[in-house]
Amino acid sequence: MGVNPHDHLRLPLVEQDLKRLEQLLADSVIVGDAYLDSVTTHLIYAGGKRLRPLLTLSAATLGERAASLEDLMGGVSVELMHLASLYHDDVMDEAEVRRNVDSVNARYGNLVAIVAGDFLMARSAAIAADLGTEVASLLAHTLASLTRGQVSEVRTAFSVGRTEEEYLRTIEGKTGSLMAASCRVGALTAEHAGAVTTALTEFGRCFGIVYQLRDDILDLVDVDNELGKPAGQDLAEGIYTLPTLVALADPTVGDELRGLLGTPLSDADRERARKLVVATDGVERTLQMAHTYRLAATSALSVVPARGLREGFAHLIDSLLEDLPTA
């Protein structure tokens, strides 16, 4: 999300809750070992949008009261799971920078980054257990979904035969599941009615899918390098997202594109492949899918009694699709 999500949510009490969460987040991983503490807090102190705890606290309080300690710790738990996944992802991607600082693997090495990610995951699980068996079970199932999504992406890397169904399973697992869990954890700590809990969970799932579809569009059209990586980087790394899958089926450019893909790409071939993809209706088809999930997300909120939250969540998901370049 290129803009501050808090500007679109417009729930002042949630903004105050997030400030309270910051210290709890750092405290949750500090154990008194100077070296380990420096590793585990590295990305915490680097900042971030805190989008997942934002969803948790919004879902818990509906924007109408201050968060309880249980609500806040629910937000800490989902953020730690997210951070753990970043530690592991950066090792897999051999990333050197995260949040404008050295990635953990670049500074401390792959082995330390993996073990530190495991530690963050363990802390997330321990906090979830303290919040009750339902939250603990939810976070365990979410971790399984994240892992399945990651495995699916690795398994289909450089595969020009990847299907749209495989792609959607991947993004639902890697992104949709944790966004859904973020909302559901808040609903559980607040003990909302079943219908409201279900609605908030579905909003989170759809929000996560829209979030990923947006990223996959930007990867192809962000020629100004606002994402901090070259446009078409997914193509170079063999991650064939929905716009590319649509382009591969295109009768005009599909064969040429298929001839380029299947192996890592040079900078010149990456740009050539990117231009082939954006010359088709792949980006437009992906944007249409994003709008479909956006509608499903906002429709799910109809049973939520808090008007401010309904409007805030609608603004939040709309902001994902605002000002998306198309070429």
Image (tube, rainbow, N blue to C red):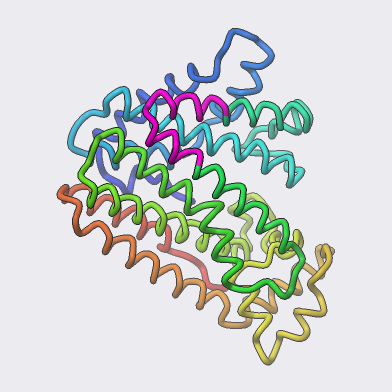
- Residue 299 place in picture, x, y as percent: 26, 64
Between 21 and 1, the one nearer to me in the picture: 21
Please identify the quarter of the rendering in which residue 108 is found: top right
Residue 271's place in the image compared with 74, above or below, is below
Q: Quadrant of residue 215?
A: bottom right
- Identity of the residue drawn at 36% across and 57% down: 317
> What is the residue that sits farthest to the bottom in this orientation?
251
Q: Is residue 136 left or right of residue 316?
A: right
> Is 132 in the magenta?
yes
Q: Residue at x 63, y 73 (%)?
A: 163
The majority secondary structure of the magenta stretch comes to: helix
Q: Is residue 149 above or below residue 39?
A: below
267 to the left or right of 294 = right
Point 74% across, 62% down: residue: 157
- Where does the image place residue 134, in percent across and percent down from the top left? 37, 36
Residue at image position (55%, 15%) is: 30
Q: Measured from the top left, where is residue 33 in percent x and y?
A: 64, 9
Quarter placement of the C terminus: bottom right
Is 12 on the left-hand or right-hand side of 114? left
In this view, the residue in front, 98 or 185, is: 185
Locate residue 196, reporting x and y percent: 23, 49
Q: Which quadrant of the view contains residue 70?
A: top left
Is-magenta flag for residue 173?
Answer: no
161 relative to 99, above or below? below
* Between 322 and 77, the one nearer to me in the picture: 77
Numbered-mark total: 0
User: Magenta residues, as a range?
Assistant: 122-140
